[in-house]
Amino acid sequence: MEQKQELKISLPSNDLAITLQGKQEQNLKMIEEAFDVQIIARGTEISIIGERESVERVERFINKFTRLIQEGNQISVQEIDYGLKLFQNNEEEKLEKIFSDVVIVTARGKQIKPKTWGQRKYIQAIRENDIVFGIGPAGTGKTYLAMAMAVAALRNKQVNRIILTRPAVEAGEKLGFLPGDLQEKVDPYLRPLYDALYDILGVETYQKLLEKNVIEVAPLAYMRGRTLDDSFIILDEAQNTTTEQMKMFLTRMGFGSKVVVTGDVTQIDLPKGKYSGLEEARKVLSDIKGIEFVYLSAQDVVRHQLVQKIIRAYELYDSGNTKEDSGSNLG
């Protein structure tokens, strides 16, 4: 058995050490578990004890994240967890590319950037294609990153306006029975889009752009009969579109425009007998140049770590049920 070694690392400052260690040294505990080493932190000094190869990998990991923190990156449990996965898969070179890809700076001075390799591929696809489909589970940043890209395009004068839309499936044909005017009736279905814009632009800037019609947030039904030039158009919750709605939406695209369609094919709320327009679009449009499909997974979830585990548990459960169903049919 290989003899254990001890390596000491001196960090540049106490603040950096606190950031790297995490709350109650949670980050260090995760690193210990991932590499099967013991880590002892005293002030700005970190001691790593373990087998030589593991110690060297931890040293590289800590040095990498020390540089990222020094460059002004915000490091949380999620970043440490994802970084560990990349290191374990010998893909550590991806870290710099992820952290260096700043999409936009919010009104509060926060940098919006991808947090996973899948998110970076999604952003790159939006930059390089006129129509992009971002498909994946909740928490993968599909809508938020698309909005950040839309605001960046508006600031850079690549487009003249932003149009955000989603189908109000739950409202169905019952909108007329809800209280208030039409906007008040559909607002609850558009609330997640408003929240993301508030965070990126700030409420005051958002309100100004809304009043000038530079930003439009509307249910999908409002898109019919229009041609949208020089616009960044986002269709959210696209799994809840019908085939007819999806075709109608995609054919609204005019010159100088960019379209991003987001959805989660595991969360379809359409009535029985209605086929998802997003599902059909995957089959019909996958080979067209200029249209890119990006698939995000539980690995790209940037919410609480339990969300990743919940998604994986449901995926395993669903796949097990599918096998049982197919087996029973054979019988």
Image (tube, grey):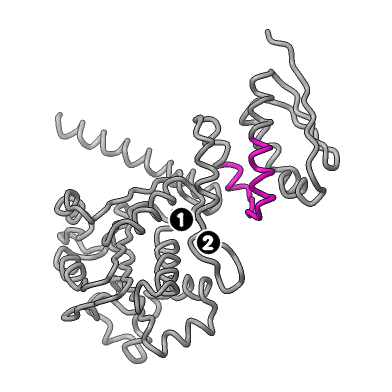
Left or right of 30 in this view: 212: left
- Point out residue 196 in the picture as x, y percentages from the top left corner: 47, 70
Q: Which residues are magenta?
A: 61-81
Vertical side of 221 occupied by 243: above or below: above
- Residue lying farthest right? 43
- Point out residue 100 in the picture as x, y percentages from the top left corner: 54, 52
Vertical side of 86 occupied by 52: above or below: above
Please tell me whether mark 2 sits on a helix, a strand or a loop.
Answer: strand
For disc 1, the marked residue is 139
Vertical side of 77 occupied by 326: above or below: above
Q: Residue at x 44, y 64 (%)?
A: 144
- Point out residue 131 in the picture as x, y percentages from the top left corner: 26, 61
Left or right of 329 in this view: 17: right
Q: Residue at x 22, y 79 (%)?
A: 173
On the question of residue 239 being in view, the answer is no
- Residue lying farthest front? 157
Amino acid type, callout 1:
Gly
For disc 2, the marked residue is 112
Residue 65 on the magenta segment: yes
Amino acid type, callout 2:
Ile
Closer to the camera: disc 1 or disc 2? 2
Q: Nearer the viewer, residue 238 or 176?
A: 238
